[in-house]
Amino acid sequence: MTSTKKKKLDIESLDFRNLPLSKLFCDYIGNSDTLSGFYAHQHTYDALKQAVESFKGHGDLKEAARIVAEFNKPFLQEQTVDELATLLAHEDTVTITTGQQLSIFGGPLYTVFKTISAIHLARSLTRDTGKKVIPVFWLADEDHDFDEIAVVSVPGRDAVRQITLPCETCARHAAGTIRVDDAFEKFRSDVYESLQPTDFHSQVTALLDEAYAPGRSYREAFGVLLSRLFSRHGLIFAGSNEPVAKKHVSGCIRKAVVKADEIRDALVRQSEQLGDRYHQQVQIADSLLFWHDDEHGRVRLKHENGIWQTDSGLSLSTDELLEQLERQPERFSPNVFLRPLIQDSLLPNAAYIGGPAEIAYYGQMKPVYELFGMEMPLISARLSATLAEPSVQRILDELPFEFADYCKRLEDLEQHYLRTHGNPELDGHFETWTSRVDALTSEMIDQIGIDEPGLQKHARAITREYAKSIDKLRKKVVNGLRQKEEVQVNRLRKAKHALFPHDRLQEREISFIYYMNKFGMDLWDRLLAELEEEEPKLFDRHLVIRF
């Protein structure tokens, strides 16, 4: 068994531009003028304060508050449904929201980083604005990307181990409605066996057993897991896959139907303008809606010339579709562009906290908010961080690389280390050899008097073949060094796999339960406490957290 002595976390911050992140994201964090027309607010804490202070509620606040409060019934620990409804309906209450798919067993690290971001900023804003700011986690209970949520990834000895829950029929159903069944137990056992036997193993598995109890839906299980970790910090939940919620936001869905052509055209224009300088995160469809078909599950609603169709055979006019909306609003489901509008119709929401991909697609959305007569919230970057375990930290201290270097390909890191460690001038020597051969060829062509172009070309070809032979020799020398430095190269690989598994940021790959199992159930509380000591600001740098 292992034990961990609790101590203050050692935190270093790094510029996002040194990491494999998009130019759009880095420019947004830096408040570049090139993005000023794509978002409603600058990415600053002062702008967030102003957005909270000036926020005005809309619609039936009391009814929306009751819907959200009832949604939280399975998760509440610190207050009652009535108390939460009263708080949400108050004119001085504002929410800041984050959210994601309902990843089984909580998903990768960025799940808790999003949650911590919302809690930390809500605390700061409550203190600095005089308003009651509530952190909300939007449970994406209408998503159908089962394959994306059904994976738990934990570091192994030499690579990341991925444990997958198979399900042949799950892709047809909203992930939030699927329930923990007998087939889940093999997956549960495999995950528990993949976690090292530590002092915290039984606590972690007991929490997961409670959340993912047999018969419980994945939406409720995910919410219970996060609520047990964060509800004491004021976190609440919201989602839209409930008949009462769909009825409440049916006016928003109606606009998506009636203004379908205007919305598509606005999205196309905005996305093309964004694409002139940056990438387009989400491709534009001809509508923002899906339809829940009894036989085929969620299917896309396609719109053309006033006719709405699905691949499953549905065909309705706009008027007929609106009649269906009146009778059965629960059959309608939003796409990635409509989900934020539904979210902001249900919550008194001043800001959304997301990662690079979410910030990118919000950049396509500003004119859609305008068409819906709604104000676009401030879009804030979430906490981004890498956790460096002590064994990895020792490697970082001893090897001649900066943290950001590890985002490079493993092969390039190995080559660089072996060349510089074995003989710092090795590459230079081989380059000198090659250049001298090339110079000698030129000299001999002149001395011999080879002036026919064909013969000169032949002489150059001989030189190129010689250069290839030199390069082959260089690789053999490097391989020889690799054998001598095998121990250090293995340590390099370990650091690479720990920090940038699959060449991606750790936070996007490794399940957060792995770190709770190693460092304790209170790990996230400790991180929140560390952030409280900082000056209020938005998350504008990547953190490297050492234990």
Image (tube, rainbow, N blue to C red):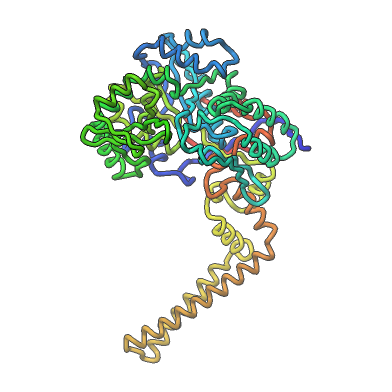
Q: In which quadrant of the rendered view does residue 41 lie?
A: top left
Q: Position of residue 115 (x, y in %)?
A: 53, 27
What residue is drawn where x is 56% and y is 31%? 112
Task: State the quadrant of the C terminus.
Answer: top right
User: Seen in the image, is 97 located left or right of residue 345?
Assistant: right
Residue at the far bottom in the pictured view: 448
Q: Position of residue 391 (x, y in %)?
A: 69, 45
Residue 158 visible? The answer is yes
User: Seen in the image, is 332 located left or right of residue 269?
Assistant: right
Compared to residue 470, the image places residue 353 above or below, namely above
Q: Nearer the viewer, residue 17 or 319?
A: 319
Q: Position of residue 335 (x, y in %)?
A: 38, 33
Compared to residue 445, the image places residue 20 above or below, namely above
Residue 50 visible? The answer is no
Q: Position of residue 540 (x, y in %)?
A: 47, 34
Task: State the quadrant of the N terminus.
Answer: top right
Q: In which quadrant of the rendered view does residue 50 lie?
A: top left
Q: Nearer the viewer, residue 278 or 423?
A: 278
